[in-house]
Structure formats: structure tokens, C-alpha cells
Amino acid sequence: MKIYLTILIFFIFHYSFSQITITDNDLISVGDVIQQVDDTSPSSAINIGSPGANQFWDFSSLQVIGSYTQQCISPASTQYSTAYPNSNLCMYDGVEHVFLNKTPSKIELLGIDDSVFADPVVVLPLPLNYGASLINGPITFIDSSISGPFVDLILATYGYSAALISGFSAHIADTISVSGDIVTEFLVDAYGTIQLPMGLYDCLRLRVERNSTTNIQVHCIDTISGSGTGWYQIPFSDFEEDVSYQWWTNNPDSRFFLAEAYVDSGDNVLDVTFTNNSFTFVNNQLKSNFSEQIIEDKTIKLDSYSDIILNSYKIYDIKGRLVKENSFTSKEIINMKPFESGTYIMNLYSDNKIVESKKIVIH
């Protein structure tokens, strides 16, 4: 009897501590650099598994199809800062600025570049723990209109006219109205361990279902009798449903999701994005192409040991301000002595494209 009790106590103890909780302190902040990799054709071995406790997901066979870097910078350092007074975090991939508001209860998406959402959209409820759920919405993410002489031109681009839209009841289109709503359902439906190319992690699985409705109407004028004047729905209004599964950890190696898999209606995996901040891969041998070394006080030696040809580098401070830039050869000695101690982000460029980012801490 004592043996059975001992075994029972072991399992209760073990599994009660295998669950984790993820808070805002575990996630991205200004100064973080997130390396992400896409596998757009995952093998059949990659599947989302089952909901429930103590699951194991083997994603070790994921391959590198494309990769990119997300820098977490201060919104105040961007040209769009005045449009986002409530943003405290911006993710920048070298092309787009994604503006967020991170709080202890959620991370909200506020807009992208100069496209400010009508209302914030929750992209991650917090804290995350097994069984947590939230329905957010409907939230209006777009509500705008276009008026004037360009309306007819815009409609003609899509093969429409006021007469076609109104069933020949009206003849002039003077306004296009676009509105969009989104409803998001979150459910932490599983916990366990995930095996990625960069390592093994305790994690929670978050199921995310987003339903978005875009409604487009055109105001048309009847110049003959006036009875046909009014708003008309056009055929390219749209409804979309996206379902994804995300795996999150409180391990400091990953400050973002470990993996995100988009699935079809049968939960078959279509593509996977995963985080690789360690630059250590097992199957595909992806490693950092460049190494940096602080060889003396505030002096950095940067080496390239790949066939990637670098053109230049740029160094930003933690607020996203450019503090140094220069052309690059295979070896570079960078003098940081004029700059204050702190955290910096170095972008390495090939043909004006970021090929890698480095986070450098100068003491």
C-alpha cells in the first residue's frame, strides 16, 4: 500500500509542477531581438497533437525556408510616434513597424506604420495558464471612407461602376465606405513539452481563432429620378476565419512564441513559424553567420565566416536611434568608446537587406 501511495504522490507532485504560467515579464520588451524562421512546407510528422495535460510535441524536423528578425524598439523613436500615444512597444522587421501596447493583462495591436486601427485588437491575453480563455470582440479594426473623383477610378480598377453596383438604378458613385470587425477566441487548451530544432521547452499551447468581416459599401447617386440614390453593398465584401496554435514558454531563451502553426479546417498544419534565438539547429545546421567579441573595453571585433557578402552595418541604441553605421569587410573592429554603457542592436546588411541582428551589451 505504501508503495502505491509513494507512486501516486510522485505523479501528483511531478505533474502539478509541470504546468507553467506566463506573464508580461516573460515576454518581449524594448531592446529584445527576436530571430524567427518559417517552414512553409512542414513534413507530415509535424502535427498539433491533442488538447490536455502533459503533451509532447515533436517539432524537431522543422526546416528553414525563410528567416527574418524582429527588433523591439521604442515607439518614440519612429516617425509614427505621434499616431500611437498609447503604444509602449514597437516591433520592426526592417520593413514594417508594428505598434503594440503591453500590459500585465494583455498585448494589444494598435496598428501598422501609418495604418492606425480604429480600436485595439488583443493579440495575446495575459497571464497565460492552462485552461485560460477569452473572447475579444467584435472589435472594429477599420472604419474609413473615400470620397471624390477617385471613387469611380477605384471601382473601375475592379471592374465595377455605379450602374452595375446599383442594378442600373443610379449613375454616379461618390463615396466608398469600408468597415471591418474582428472577433478572436483564445483558449489555453494544453500544456507539456515541445521539441524544437533549438531545444526542448516546457510550454503552454494557445489556440487562437480569428473571424474577421470586411464590409464595403458604395454610395451611388440617381441623377434622373433620385429614387435610386443610396448605399449599395458590393460583392468583394469578405468573411475570413483563421485558426492557429501557438506554443509559449517562460524560458528566458524565448521572449516570443516558440512556434505558431496555422491549420486548415481539419487541423492539418499548413505552415509553421518558430523562434530561434539560440542560433543552434540540429537538423538543418543553421547557425549564426557572424560572431562578435568584445576584445577590450567598448571595442568590438566582428567576424564573418560564411559566404554571405556584407555591405554594411548599423548600430541602434535601445530607443531605436541610429548611433553608428559603416561599410563592412570580412573583419571589422568597431570602436564603441564614444557611446554610453548599455544595450545596442547591430544590424548586418547584404544588398541593403538585414541578414542578421545582434544584441550587444556594453559595460
Image (tube, grey):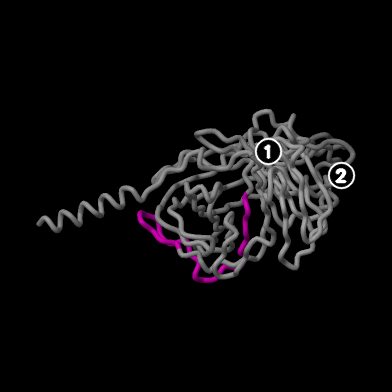
Q: Residue at x 57, y 67 (%)?
A: 42
Q: Most extreme residue toward the left, as rendered?
A: 1
Q: Residue at x 66, y 38 (%)?
A: 342
Q: Residue at x 70, y 55 (%)?
A: 356
Q: Residue at x 54, y 50 (%)?
A: 254
- Left or right for 52, reference 209: left
Mark 1 surroundings: few (<14), some (14-19) or many (≥20) residues within 10 A: many
- Which quarter of the figure is the N terminus placed in? bottom left
Circles 2 and 1, Cβ within 8 Å, touching? The answer is no
The spot of residue 44 in percent (x, y) is 52, 71
Could you say which is closer to the camera, residue 58 or residue 123? 58
Determine which of the numbered discs, if any, sits on residue 318 in the image: 1
Could you say which is closer to the camera, residue 17 or residue 316? 316
Q: Spatial distance from mark 2 to mark 1, Cα to Cα?
A: 47 Å
Residue 228 visible within the image: no
Quarter-wise, where is residue 79 in the image?
top right
Residue 115 visible within the image: yes
Q: Disc 2 marks which residue?
A: 152
Q: Which residues are magenta?
A: 34-57
